Image (spheres, rainbow, N blue to C red):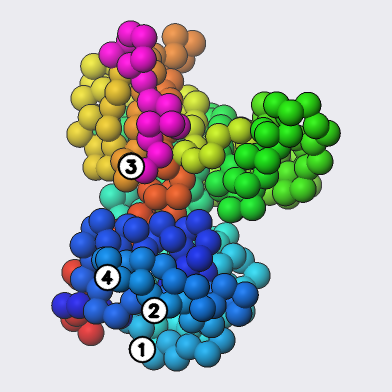
C-alpha cells in the first residue's frame, strides 16, 4: 500500500532528514507534501530526483495525508498536532506530547507493542534523541540481566538545537581562529572550543529539562522501575550525540555475554576491539541509521558495565526513528483500517 505523507517543518534539520530517510528506506510514498511557515514556502526540496515545492502549512488540507511527520517544535505542535490528528496520524518530534498518558512514545526495536492504542489521540511521539540511543542499548541488557540503575553523561552535538545552532558553531569557530570577539546567540556561552553543561531549561531540583527527559522517557519506554540519572552537555560537534553510560544489572554477567548480546541487538553495532581507533566517534557515525556501542567493560566497583554509545541524533535520534514508526503503521495498522 502506498500512502500520502505530509511533513510539517520540512525545511528544518529534522524535516530534511525525514525526506532523506523516506527515500533511503524506499518508503511506499504515493504523494509527498512538504510544508513550512510562510517564510520558507515556495522553496524546493529534492525527493527521488524530483524537486518538490514547499507549501504554506496554513493552506494545507490534512485530509490528503495518511501520515504527518511534525518537525516544527513544541509551541506549534501543542496547537496544530491535535487538529491535524483529526484527519491524519501524527508522528510528532517535540517534547510536548511524550509523557502524556494516551500518547505512545515509541522506539520500534524496543516497544512497538505500545502502538496498539495509538488511535485514541492519533498522535505518536518520537523520543528525545539522547533517550533513543540509550534505550536501544539498554533493552537487550534489561531483557537478559534486568537493568536496575543507569548513570549517564551525554556529549550532545549542536544540531540537536537546530540549524541556527550549527551555523553559530561554525561562525564562532571562524571568529575564534581569527581572534575576533565571540558573541553567543543561540547558546548561553561560547560553544566553539568549549563545552556547556546546560541543555534546555533548569528545573527546581537543579537538573535540566533535557536530563529530566532522559530519565523519565527511559522509564516510560522500557521500565518504570529503572533508576536513571543524567548529566547532559552540549559539545562543539555538528552531528551525532555520544554518551558515557554506567549500567547496573540485577543478575550476574560476564563481559563476553554483554558483547554478544549487544552485537545482536536490533539497530546496534558494536565496535570494541580494545585497540587504537577501535571505537565509535561522532564523525564517522553521522549519516548512519545505526547506534554504535564501544568501550564495553566491567565496572569493578559493583555488578555493572560501562559503555560508550554514539548515534546520529538527526537520524535514529529523530527522522529515521519516525520513519520506522511509519513503516510499522503501514505494515500493521493503516492498511487494516
Q: Nearer the viewer, residue 114 or 28?
A: 28
- Separation (CA) of disc 1 from disc 4: 17 Å
* Residue occupying the far left of the picture: 1
Q: Nearer the viewer, residue 264 or 46?
A: 46
Please report the residue visible at 43 percent of the width from the left and 77 percent of the height from the top: 53
Q: Position of residue 61 (x, y in %)?
A: 45, 91
* SS label for mark 2: strand
Mark 2 or mark 1, which has the lower sequence index?
2
**Relative to the observer, which residue lies in front, 155 or 37?**
37
Q: Residue at x 59, y 76 (%)?
A: 37
Q: Are circles 1 and 3 on residues that touch, CB within 8 Å?
A: no
Dot 2 corresponds to which residue?
A: 33
Q: Residues within 10 Å of mark 3 (few under 14, many from 20)?
A: some
Residue 275, percent from left and from top = 33, 8
Q: Which residue is mark 3?
A: 288
Q: Is residue 285 on the magenta stretch?
A: yes
Q: Point out the frontmost of discs 3 and 4.
A: 3
- Which stretch did the figure color magenta? 273-287
Mark before the other along the chain sequence, 4 or 2: 2
- Under circle 4, the secondary element is helix
Front position among marks 2 and 1: 2
Q: Would you name the residue on which mark 1 appears?
A: 64
229 or 74: nearer the viewer: 74
How would you classify the magenta stretch by its main secondary structure? loop
Mark pair 3, 4: CA separation: 23 Å
Q: Secondary structure at mark 3?
A: loop
Q: Residues within 10 Å of mark 1 (few under 14, many from 20)?
A: some
Q: Earlier in the sequence, mark 3 or mark 2?
A: 2
Q: Is residue 160 visible?
A: yes
Q: Which residue is mark 4?
A: 329
Amino acid at each position: 500500500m502506498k500512502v500520502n505523507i505530509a511533513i510539517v517543518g520540512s525545511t528544518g534539520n529534522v524535516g530534511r532528514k525525514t525526506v532523506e530517510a523516506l527515500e533511503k528506506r524506499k518508503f511506499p510514498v504515493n504523494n509527498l507534501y512538504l510544508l513550512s511557515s510562510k517564510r520558507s514556502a515556495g522553496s524546493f526540496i529534492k525527493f527521488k530526483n524530483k524537486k518538490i515545492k514547499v507549501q504554506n502549512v496554513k493552506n494545507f488540507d490534512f485530509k490528503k495525508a495518511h501520515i504527518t511527520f511534525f518537525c516544527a517544535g513544541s509551541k506549534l505542535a501543542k496547537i496544530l498536532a491535535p487538529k491535524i490528528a483529526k484527519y491524519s496520524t501524527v508522528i510528532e518530534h517535540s517534547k510536548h506530547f511524550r509523557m502524556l498518558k494516551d500518547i505512545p512514545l515509541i522506539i520500534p526495536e524496543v516497544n512497538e507493542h505500545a502502538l496498539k492504542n495509538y488511535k485514541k489521540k492519533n498522535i505518536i511521539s518520537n523520543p528525545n534523541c539522547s533517550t533513543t540511543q540509550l534505550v536501544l542499548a539498554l533493552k537487550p541488557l534489561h531483557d537478559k540481566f534486568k537493568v536496575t540503575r543507569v548513570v549517564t553523561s551525554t556529549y550532545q552535538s549542536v544540531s540537536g538545537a537546530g540549524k541556527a545552532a550549527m551555523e553559530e558553531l561554525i561562525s564562532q569557530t571562524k571568529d575564534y581562529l581569527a581572534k575576533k570577539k565571540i558573541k553567543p546567540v543561540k547558546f548561553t556561552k561560547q560553544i566553539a572550543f568549549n563545552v556547556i553543561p546546560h541543555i534546555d531549561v533548569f528545573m527546581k531540583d537543579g537538573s535540566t529539562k533535557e536530563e529530566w527527559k532522559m530519565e523519565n522517557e527511559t522509564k516510560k519506554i522500557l521500565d518504570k522501575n529503572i533508576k536513571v540519572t543524567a548529566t547532559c552537555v552540549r559539545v562543539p560537534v555538528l552531528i551525532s550525540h555520544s554518551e558515557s553510560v554506567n549500567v547496573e544489572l540485577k543478575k550476574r554477567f560476564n563481559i563476553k555475554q554483554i558483547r554478544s548480546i549487544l552485537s545482536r541487538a536490533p539497530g546496534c553495532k558494536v565496535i570494541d576491539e580494545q585497540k587504537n581507533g577501535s571505537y565509535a566517534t561522532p564523525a564517522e557515525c553521522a549519516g548512519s541509521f545505526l547506534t554504535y556501542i564501544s568501550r564495553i567493560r566491567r565496572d569493578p566497583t559493583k555488578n555493572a558495565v560501562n559503555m560508550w554509545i554514539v548515534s546520529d541524533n538527526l537520524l535514529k535520534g529523530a527522522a529515521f526513528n519516525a520513519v520506522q514508526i511509519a513503516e510499522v503503521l503501514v505494515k500493521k495498522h493503516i492498511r487494516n483500517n
